[in-house]
């Protein structure tokens, strides 16, 4: 699970058929895919293990059989909570389902999903119809028999139909959609600033200037959008960087703490244990 900037630019293996299926594995308990978003819909089907998935302010604990839908432009992250996590990740550019001319399916259903007018529920665990549909899509994608593109496209239309009938969370007005995109753009600058300056002292006053907001409104908006405080996010980000350093380099614990923005080694140790459920020294023992 690699670090990315907040907005992820998603490459597709075949630009003429913009969707892909990834089989994702992680054996490192506590490893986190940092918060990011992209303009594609993403589905995470858990095959083994357990994890915590954050979608905007919704925290979802998942186990084998769980299914999570990430809407276009949802800020999301994944934290592995076991030593043997396996999940299928289906990423769909919804333009794949657009028509060559403006028909009613596009104007009533596909465009509103692309434009974020329709927001689906994130946790759709237990819907056997959707799981079966997605498993067929995964099979067709992997086998790539003649006509697999037709089979996948048909399966995705069936999937969207079932979502529309059973899993709409809310409908957004054009004004609400615009506000959502503006918030994402503000947070893009915030996350990029943290990525580039996490080793330095970062105050709420500093970061609110980056977002061009007052400290009070920034803190409120950040919590409303991500479900966590900025201080919690910053500590988590730094601890994830520290874990990576301790696993992959020979830097000692004090050097690692300083490199990740912690000037107090005792505070660093407390934060590491809080976020990783183990002391930083345990990684040195493993090495």
Image (cartoon, rainbow, N blue to C red):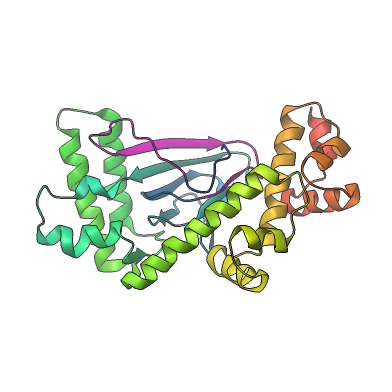
Relative depth, front residue between 227 and 205:
205
Count of all numbered marks drawn on residues in the image: 0
> Which span of residues is magenta-colored?
8-36
**Image quadrant in which the N terminus is located:** top right
Relative depth, front residue between 113 and 285:
113
Q: Residue 239 at what x, y percent from top left?
A: 73, 46
Q: Quadrant of residue 286?
A: top right
Q: Is residue 273 above or below residue 116?
A: above
Instruction: Mark yes or no: residue 190 visible.
Output: yes
Q: Residue 63 at what x, y percent from top left?
A: 52, 52
Instruction: Mark yes or no: residue 171 visible.
Output: no
Is 99 placed left or right of 180 in the picture? left
Q: Is residue 257 above or below residue 74?
A: above
**Image quadrant in which the C terminus is located:** top right
Is 76 placed left or right of 223 in the picture? left
Q: Quadrant of residue 52?
A: bottom right
Is 285 placed left or right of 222 in the picture? right
The residue located at (79%, 39%) in the rendering is 259
Is 158 placed left or right of 228 in the picture? left
The residue located at (75%, 40%) in the rendering is 242
Q: Is residue 143 above or below residue 168?
A: above
Q: Is residue 204 above or below residue 134?
A: below
Asked if the stretch drawn in magenta spans residue 108, the answer is no
The residue located at (41%, 42%) in the rendering is 89
Q: Residue 196 at what x, y percent from top left?
A: 65, 42
Relative depth, front residue between 59 and 225:
225
Q: Residue 88 at what x, y percent from top left?
A: 42, 41
Asked if the stretch drawn in magenta spans residue 22, the answer is yes
């Amino acid at each position: 699970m690699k670090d990315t900037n907040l907005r992820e630019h998603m490459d597709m293996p075949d630009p003429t058929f913009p969707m892909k299926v990834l089989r994702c594995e992680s054996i490192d308990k506590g490893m986190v895919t940092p918060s990011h978003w992209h303009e594609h819909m993403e589905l995470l089907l858990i095959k083994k293990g357990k994890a915590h998935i954050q979608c905007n302010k919704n925290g979802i604990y998942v186990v084998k059989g769980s299914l999570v839908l990430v809407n276009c432009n949802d800020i999301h992250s994944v934290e592995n909570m076991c030593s043997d996590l396996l999940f299928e990740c289906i990423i769909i550019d919804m333009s794949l389902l657009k028509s060559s001319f403006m028909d009613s399916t596009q104007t009533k259903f596909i465009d509103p999903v692309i434009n974020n007018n329709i927001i689906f529920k994130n946790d759709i665990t237990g819907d056997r119809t959707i799981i079966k549909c997605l498993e067929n899509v995964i099979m067709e994608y992997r086998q790539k028999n003649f006509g697999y593109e037709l089979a996948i496209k048909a399966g995705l239309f069936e999937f969207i139909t079932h979502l529309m009938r059973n899993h709409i969370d809310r409908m957004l007005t054009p004004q609400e959609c615009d506000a959502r995109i503006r918030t994402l753009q503000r947070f893009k600058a915030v996350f990029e600033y943290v990525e580039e300056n996490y080793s330095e002292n970062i105050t709420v006053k500093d970061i609110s200037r980056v977002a061009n907001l007052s400290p009070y409104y920034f803190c409120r908006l950040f919590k409303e959008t991500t479900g966590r405080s900025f201080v919690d996010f910053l500590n988590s980000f730094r601890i994830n960087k520290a874990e990576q350093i301790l696993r992959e380099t020979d830097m000692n614990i004090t050097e690692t703490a300083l490199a990740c923005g912690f000037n107090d080694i005792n505070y660093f140790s407390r934060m590491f244990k809080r976020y990783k459920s183990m002391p930083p020294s345990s990684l040195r023992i493993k090495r």
